Amino acid sequence: MLPLGDRRLALAELVAAKGGLVAADLVDRLTDGRAVVRANALLGLAALGHTGSELVPFLRDGEAEVARAAAEALAHLGASQRPHLVAIATALDGARREVTDIVETLFAELIGQADAELTGVLDTREAAAVTAIVGACARRGLQGLYLLVAAARDPRARVRINALGGVALLAELDAGSSLEVLRAVAADDQAADVRAAAQRAVATMTQRLADAVTARRKAGGPTAAAVPELELRALTPAGLETPDEAHGLRIVELICLLPDARELLFIAFDGEAQNVQINAALGIGALGAKRAGPEGRRRLSARLVGPPTRRRDAVVKALAMLGATSPVG
């Protein structure tokens, strides 16, 4: 057997010499006080294809080389670690970034092979575990997003809540499908906390899309490449439901990019939801006097009756944006 205490051995060396390795001996060496011995023992177990759970706790070993060796060992073992994915993800709480990177790459490679187990990891309140799954899905692209979209319909409420948050973060990969599932869950899910999570996810998604457009416009790039027109339309009225005025204005900025923004904002302004009306009013103002036209001023002015309200304040502000006067009081 190769001496484990002389120097750090490469995984390839241990694979080549695996005929002289004994799993039980390597497991015993995991308790050795020397970091180099523990690291080599972990990689030796991987070389043997050892599928036990003994490797998992070492993801948070106090020595960086040991923690990295544990992650590399698990990555080498790949799909054989399917029964341990929950434990692996949970062990990432407090782990070093290089360790989480390796594990996220492992999880990404398992998408399409171990979807049930990866989805099961989302049945947790551990932020590090959820972050690892979402990070893996981001690495895999559309296939990762679709795993989260499917998980948003999982029977387990906690899985749905965590999946919804992930969908919002990756929505730019397919904004149409993402918004469809978020809005459906927000409207139809039987659990109030899941519906609330879906509503938060819609807000997160729309803000991220707004950020993408703003960044692209500042860089002088084509806005359409960041948010296709079909997806912009999907944000009306969903994105206007936010109570956050700053967020609402960013969604308005997106909607105003559409050639028929005026008509879309008129429809939203005529709706019943107060936040939608408020943001739509500000959107009409943001169109400018030429695009909003006399009809825009007329619709806004018609809502000035009655006592002061948030909606009335928004209408006054919108009229001012159009250069129109409005009665006060």
Image (spheres, rainbow, N blue to C red):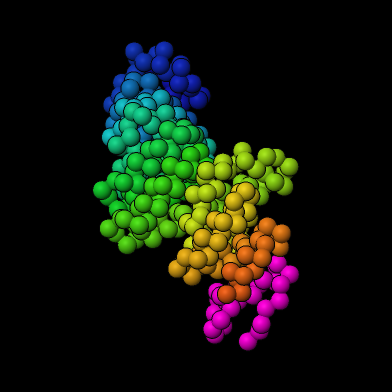
Q: Nearer the viewer, residue 291 or 277?
A: 291
Is residue 305 located in the magenta-colored stretch of the structure? yes
Residue 317 location in percent, x, y? 66, 72
Range of the magenta residues? 303-329
Residue at (43% x, 50% y) in the render: 165
Give the quadrant of the C terminus. Answer: bottom right
Residue 16 location in percent, x, y? 41, 12
**Drawn side of residue 129 relative to residue 173, left or right:** left
**Drawn side of residue 281 relative to residue 37, left or right:** right
Give the quadrant of the N terminus. Answer: top left
Q: Residue 229's quadrant in the figure?
A: top right
Query: Is residue 22 placed above or below 89 in the rendered structure?
Result: above
Is residue 281 located in the magenta-colored stretch of the structure? no
Residue at (39% x, 47% y) in the render: 181
Q: Nearer the viewer, residue 106 or 171?
A: 171
Query: Is residue 270 placed above or below 38 in the rendered structure?
Result: below
Residue 272 location in percent, x, y? 45, 68
* Residue that sits furthest to the left in the current view: 155
Q: Residue 223's quadrant in the figure?
A: top right
**Drawn side of residue 221 relative to residue 244, left or right:** right
Residue at (46% x, 67% y) in the render: 273
Residue at (26% x, 48% y) in the render: 155
